[in-house]
Image (cartoon, helix red, strand yellow):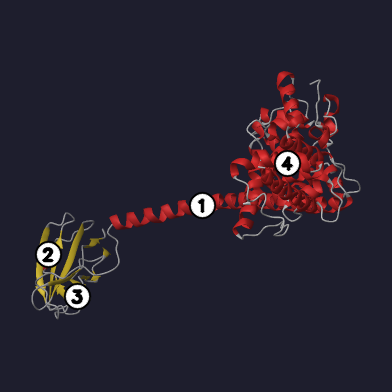
Amino acid sequence: MTAWAVPRTFGLPAPASKSRRRSCCTPVMPGSSAAGWLDDQTVSRSSSDLSDDELVAQYRLAPTSGRSRQLLDELMRRHHGRVVAWCYRLTGDREAAPDLAQDVFLKAYSSLESFRSDSKFTTWLYVIARNRCRDEHRARAVRVREAEYEPVDVGQDWNGGVAALAARDARTVLRSLMDEVLGETERVVMTLHYGHDVPLDAITTSLGLTNASGAKSYIVSAKRKLNAAVRRWNART
Amino acid sequence: MERENLSAALAPGADCLTLEQLGLYADGALTGAEGTAAAAHIRTCVNCGAELLLLHRVTSTPVSARESAIVDEGVLALAHRAAADARAAEATQKSSTRLFRWTIPALAALMAVLLLIVVVDRLNIRGGAAPPLPASVKADDDALRSQAVSARAPLGDQYEPPQRLEWIAVPHASRYRARLMEVDRHELWSASTTATQIDLPSEVRALSVPSKTLLWEVTAFDASGRQIAESGAQAFRLVPR
């Protein structure tokens, strides 16, 4: 890969080069006792010296051997803290994070055969975590919708424009108006929340939004702008 | 309706990269034409750009002091669960071992008992109800088990030819029949009496010679003439002088 083209509007850093891969996805846990727990050497020196890819490769060679459990334990021990942190960031739910992390590891155990070494093990784990957390959010959203609860209500005056759009026009019109009237962060927050089922708390945490209401205030302001823009668009057409 | 419209409008399109492809892209693992096409799409797609931004922020942002406590708590919870699972697995294994250790002997013992029952049944050694009475016996009749007549003399070695045969009285017996026999149960003499002894005639006593074993037996009869007891063969021998 030579031409790394990243949309400037999302403020993405340059993608990792091959030589930087090892540390790219490793969260730093300063002063954390979790970090101490992760560093606790409970398996043989040889296992702990192996890279993630090497551990997986050795596991694949003899998945039913007595050593295979030790290899898996070492893999998971390395990434426990990381996956708990990801699950918290992707859901914003402190209580659910350990449960989701456990699900992620169970899924990883059962599908280790599908891991391709052309991506990093941590990225592969992230994909599992992201899918699991999205499923969890969707399940919760269904329960919330069943209770007819709208978490972000911008008020009666501002509703109507978007809701009144014909379904066939919604995608084209809203995407065009979003580019026209929303700011960069508003677009990303709206897309992650409505298009990718990311909870508001998770967006606040993941994107490091430091304003008082976090992602919710961006949603409120974006919806007001969009509803107004839709009404103008309706008046024009 | 508003939520549905927003979700429909902002959902990823059919040409968007999958999460796995975005992961490969982030790792620099999409190369050549595939990588170029991915980069071109991401440059203009708000969905893929947002998902890629999320991946990068979630995996690369250092854990804050607040998050550190949450991570510690979660990791400890996982460690406790792992330890509990290990203990449960160990307990299950021990339980299985214990079960295996006791199951085999228990089954063997059970089989032995069953075998014993079958053997006893075959040998007709049964408890429970008595066999039915013969048709000739009424319910209010005295029903006596066939019993033995206890012989008293002569038994075993004798130094003089016996004068008589003696036995113990049998209840309800009104008559006894005594028989003297060779060892091959050939009858030499017999007689009936109502007493519990009977004298041997002199010619019969003369049959008792040294070193020759003779057998005798007594059968008891009740008043109706039904046999109610017998002694079985008793043996005696005149010791040579």
Q: Residue B201 placed where, x, y %?
A: 11, 69
- The label shown at residue A177 is 4
Identify the secondary structure beneath mark 4: helix
Residue at image x 65%, y 59%? A149
Q: Residue A72 placed where, x, y %?
A: 72, 38
- The label shown at residue B144 is 3
What residue sits right under mark 2 in the picture?
Answer: B204
Q: Tell whether label 3 touches label 2 (CB within 8 Å).
A: no
- The label shown at residue B103 is 1
Q: Nearer the viewer, mark 2 or mark 4?
A: 4
Q: Tell whether label 4 touches label 2 (CB within 8 Å).
A: no
What residue occupies the far front of the structure in this picture?
A236
Q: Nearer the viewer, mark 1 or mark 2?
A: 1
Residue B228 lies, with reference to residue A7, above or below; the image says below
Chain letter of disc 4 in the image: A
Q: Residue A53 placed where, x, y %?
A: 75, 29
C-alpha distance separating marks 2 and 4: 143 Å
C-alpha distance separating marks 4 and 1: 75 Å
N-term-proximal mark, 1 vs 2: 1
- Which quarter of the image is occupied by the C terminus of chain B? bottom left
